Structures are given as structure tokens and as C-alpha cells.
Amino acid sequence: MPAFMTVARREWQAYFATPLAYVFLVVFLVLCGFATFELGGFYQRNQADLQVFFSYQPWLYLFLVPAIAMRIWAEERKSGSIELLLTLPLTLRSIVLAKFFSAWLFVALALLLTFPFWITVNYLGEPDNGAILAAYLGSWLMAGAFLSIGCCLSATSKSQVIVFVLTVSTCFLFVLLGTPQLLDSLSGVLPQLLIDAVAQLSLLTHFDAISRGVLDLRDVLFYAFFIACWLAATGIVIEQKKAE
């Protein structure tokens, strides 16, 4: 456990050792505000909820989360410090988890800093705070899913630019699977059972359910399983790269 915490603390401190963390936080908060109040017409809707705030989360994460994830392993491989990291008295699984959870906690910090939106909506009306809390949880889970994809792809290349592009593309695919436009286009071409199966693979489908305040255990388990699979794939990729 001490070694696990050492890796996690090292990763956490690395974010704030460069301007990257501060730039990410500022950009994330500014874009959240712009999307909510300008694009979403928060005041024009005359509804005391944060639905419009959460509706833009997948699209903000699509570009901002890969920017965090791209350095998780690519930087270690480029600097050569991955060899030293893997000699620590820790299993590869523990190292992967430590690096992932550090990044995930950083995203949690970004979400926590959006608390003025929650305060604003409570000042203006009487929202369902339970539904808002569930939506925050769903948002964090979705960000974790994006991060797990980026974590795996970061282990495949030394180039952070390549990792960023691959992560954005892969995350976009898993978001696209749940869009009404795609599902409607498949209607009449594929059986409804297969269309429903495709929709269930989408990160957007499960997030939409939670963002409406419906905290279904199946959606939470989907995210947990999704993250676990990509982190397991990360370990496999690192083992293969180590053998090269």
C-alpha cells in the first residue's frame, strides 16, 4: 500500500508541476459555463435543473479528458522512466490502478469546482438535488470510462499527439453508438435486438439515464466493467511492450 500511494502521489503532483493542470481546469470551467449559459440557454429555459449543464459533458470530455490521459504512459515511455517504475515492489496491476485513479481524482477536482452551478440553480429555484448528485456521479463515471480508454492507448505509443488523436477517435465511437441519428439510420437495416445491443455499448446511453436522475445499478456496473476491461487491456499492452 505505501508503494501504491507513492505512485499515486507522484502522478498527482506531476499534474501540478506543469501548467497543464491549471490550463485544463480553467478551460473546463469556462467551457462548462459557456455551454450552459450561452449555448444551452440556461436562463431562457426557466427550469431549476442542470440538465443542460450535463447534456454538454460528453462532448467536453471528448477532447479534454484525452488531453489528460495522453501523458499517463506515453510520457513514461518517451523519457524511459517506465523501466524504473516497473521495478518498484508493486504488481503491474497496482501501478496501472495508481496512475488511473490519480487522473480520475483530478477529473473529480474539476467537477467539484463546478459547484457554483449547483449553488446558482438552488438560488433560482428548488431543483431535485438527488437527481443532480446522481448526474454528477454519472459524469464522473463517464470521465473514468474515457480515461480508461486513454490509459490503454497511452501505453501503445511514445507520441502524446498520436495517443490524443486515437483516444478522441475511440471515445467518439463509443459516444456515437448511442446517438439517435445513428440508431435511426440502423433502423430497418438491422434487427431491433441488435440495434438495442449497439445502443447498450454506448457511453452516452448509460450517461443519459443517470443524468436524468435515474441511478440504475446496471448503468453503474456497465461503467465499472467498461473501465476494468480497458485497464486490463492496459496491463496486457505494457507487458507486450516490455517484452519487445
Image (spheres, rainbow, N blue to C red):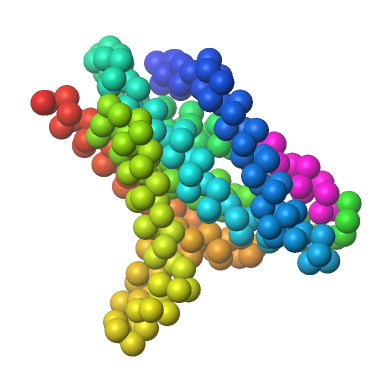
Q: Is residue 54 magenta?
A: no
- The one nearer the camera, 92 or 27, is 27
Q: State the image quarter where residue 131 is shown.
A: bottom right
Horizontal side of residue 143 vs 192, given as left or right: right
Q: Please, what is the dominant secondary structure of the magenta stretch?
A: helix
Residue 132 in sight here: no
Residue at the extreme bottom of the image, as rendered: 188
Q: Measuring 53% from the left and 25% from the top, which residue is drawn there?
A: 20
Q: State the image quarter where residue 76 is shown.
A: top left
For residue 155, above or below residue 45: above
Which stretch appears magenta? 110-122
Q: Measuring 69% from the left and 36% from the top, which residue is drawn there?
A: 113
Horizontal side of residue 24 vs 73, given as left or right: right
Horizontal side of residue 43 vs 31, given as left or right: right
Q: Count the numbered circles shown.
A: 0
Q: Position of residue 7 (x, y in %)?
A: 42, 19
The quarter of the image holding the C terminus is: top left
Q: Position of residue 13 (x, y in %)?
A: 52, 17
Q: Measuring 60% from the left and 55% from the top, which residue is drawn there?
A: 56
For residue 78, above or below residue 109: above
Q: Position of residue 125 (x, y in %)?
A: 87, 59
For residue 15, above or below residue 212: above
Q: Is residue 111 magenta?
A: yes
Q: Measuring 82% from the left and 60% from the top, which residue is drawn there?
A: 43
Horizontal side of residue 20 vs 99, given as left or right: right
Q: State the image quarter where residue 3 is shown.
A: top left
The quarter of the image holding the N terminus is: top left
Residue 74 in sight here: yes
Q: Position of residue 89 (x, y in %)?
A: 30, 15
